[in-house]
Image (cartoon, helix red, strand yellow):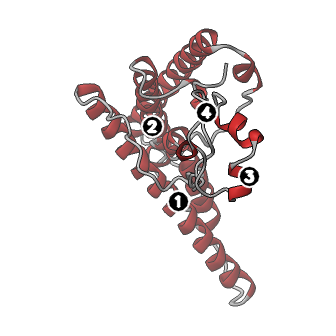
Amino acid sequence: MSNAIPHSSLPIDLPDEIRQSAKALKSAAANFPPPPDVEPIADNGTAKTKQPVPPKGAVSSFIATVHFLSKICGVVAASMFAIAMFIICQLVFMRYVLNASTTWQTEAVIYLMIGATLVGLPYVQMIRGHVNVDLLPLYLRRGPRKVLAIITLLCGIGISALFGYYGLELVIEAFEGGWLSETIWAVPLWKPFSSLPIGFGLLFLQFCADLLGLLTQRTTPFDISEDTF
């Protein structure tokens, strides 16, 4: 027969009796190629993929500088919390073991805890550690989601700028007026008050860096993957 299919076109690993059957010939004449002898190895993430290189320039330098400052704030805030815990332990030892009076420990712990919370604001914003509800952004499409993210960041910029400005005004007024705490320790109040302009001022810069990263497509709105809707 002139239309017969040569045996060389059949899979080489089939037995001779199957290779000679009409079913095998019909299968070989089909449009689908025979299955490969070796199954492909599943990609477990070890293969190197080409990552997009972020653009360089003034915006990238600004964002990197703000992130560095935010990380410093995170280290300072964690150190302040650690010092406050150490002072609490010292207070308990002094009062309940040595039966001695304490004069400055309680006030110092209060100032350190509040100051650490304020100074740590930009770091928490950088790592997206604030409590947020992302139900609405998840149900929005890319365009409205980006608009909502821009509005949210603009609100954060405005609020942080407001608190930072009035915090700085409060520090200057406390310094010029010589304000002291109404305790035996009599702490100059401009020192604990300084955590307000520092924390909210750097939070303002972090919000600005987040907004620039969003507008230049370095980040995604609410850190949601672009594949979502």
Tag on residue 192?
A: none
Instruction: Measure the alpha-carbon separation of dots 2 and 1.
Output: 26 Å
Going from N to C along the chain, the mark reached first, 2 or 4, is: 4
Q: Amino acid at mark 4?
A: Ala
Q: Which badge, 1 or 4, is on the more N-terminal residue?
A: 4
Foreground tag (2 vs 3): 3
The three-letter code of the residue at mark 1 reads: Ala
How far apart marks 2 and 3 lie (CA) works out to: 97 Å
3D distance between C-alphas at marks 1 and 4: 81 Å
Give the residue displayed 57% in from the left and 53% down from the top: 111
Foreground: 39 or 122?
Answer: 39
Along the polypeptide, which appears first: circle 3 or circle 1?
3
Q: Position of residue 33 (x, y in %)?
A: 60, 36
Residue beneath label 1, please?
78
Q: Is residue 32 left or right of residue 55?
A: right
Read off the residue under disc 2: 174
Distance from disc 4 to disc 3, alpha carbons, whole Å, reads 16 Å
Mark 4 — residue?
A: 4
Q: How far, Cα to Cα, is label 2 from label 4?
A: 101 Å
Q: Residue at x 58, y 47 (%)?
A: 117
